[in-house]
Amino acid sequence: MTLKIGREVAAMTRMTPGELQDKFAEVFGEQPRSHNKQWLVKRIAWRLQANEEGDLSERARRRAMELANDADLRVTAPRRPNDGGSPTNKTPARFRVDGRLPMPGTVITREYKGRMLEVTVLPNGFEYEGEVYKALSAVAKAITGTHWNGYHFFGMRKRGGGQ
């Protein structure tokens, strides 16, 4: 980059976006679609440098046109099929199953204050005394009246860690 272009770029960094748009129109002969200051400075600097030092050779231009003609270029993104529904993802959600939990149907037992507690593991929760709870901690809270970590309350430590 020559000293003259360097000075112009330095001056452009102090310009407002409106002034840069006017400069872009002067250099390119059309109004820019962007109001982004950094983008305008880069594009104007590129054009000034190309004008001063020379643009692409004719051979390079022909080759670029050949490549562009051979490529399947898409100007806009493909439209989503309109099925009347919402444009949300319709794949089913996958839930991570905690490795500390036994298979559904298993009965977890624990003695608490002289009573033997039995909790059945369900595919989507836990059953205790005829009620279904979403979390093992909710079962422990229903039993004790205070918040407990359900895995800790029922003695179900991490896999491989021992008890």
Image (cartoon, helix red, strand yellow):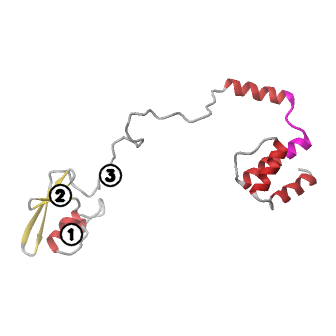
Going from N to C along the chain, the mark reached first, 2 or 1, is: 2
Q: Which residue is mark 1?
A: 153
Residue span colored magenta: 47-58
Q: Quadrant of the C terminus?
A: bottom left
Q: Which residue is mark 3?
A: 96
State the CA–CA distance, disc 2 to disc 1.
14 Å
Residue at x 86%, y 42% (from the top left corner)? 50
Which-is-in-front pick, marks 2 and 1?
A: 2
Residue 57 is a magenta residue: yes
Nearer-the-camera pick, 37 or 89: 37
State the CA–CA distance, disc 1 to disc 3.
22 Å
Residue 103 is a magenta residue: no
Going from N to C along the chain, the mark reached first, 2 or 3, is: 3
State the CA–CA distance, disc 2 to disc 3.
16 Å
Question: How far across and how far down the image is residue 73, in percent?
Answer: 63, 30
Residue type pointed to by label 1: Phe
The secondary structure type at the circle numbered 3 is: loop
Residue 131 to residue 2: above or below:
below
Q: Residues within 10 Å of mark 2 (few under 14, many from 20)?
A: many
Residue type pointed to by label 3: Arg
Residue at x 73%, y 55% (from the top left corner)? 37
Most frequent secondary structure within the magenta stretch: helix
Residue at x 77%, y 51% (from the top left corner)? 21
Nearer-the-camera pick, 77 or 148: 77
Counting every numbered tag in the picture gives 3
Q: Residues within 10 Å of mark 3 (few under 14, many from 20)?
A: few
The secondary structure type at the circle numbered 2 is: strand
Residue type pointed to by label 2: Phe
Which-is-in-front pick, marks 1 and 3?
A: 3
Q: Which mark is residue 126?
A: 2
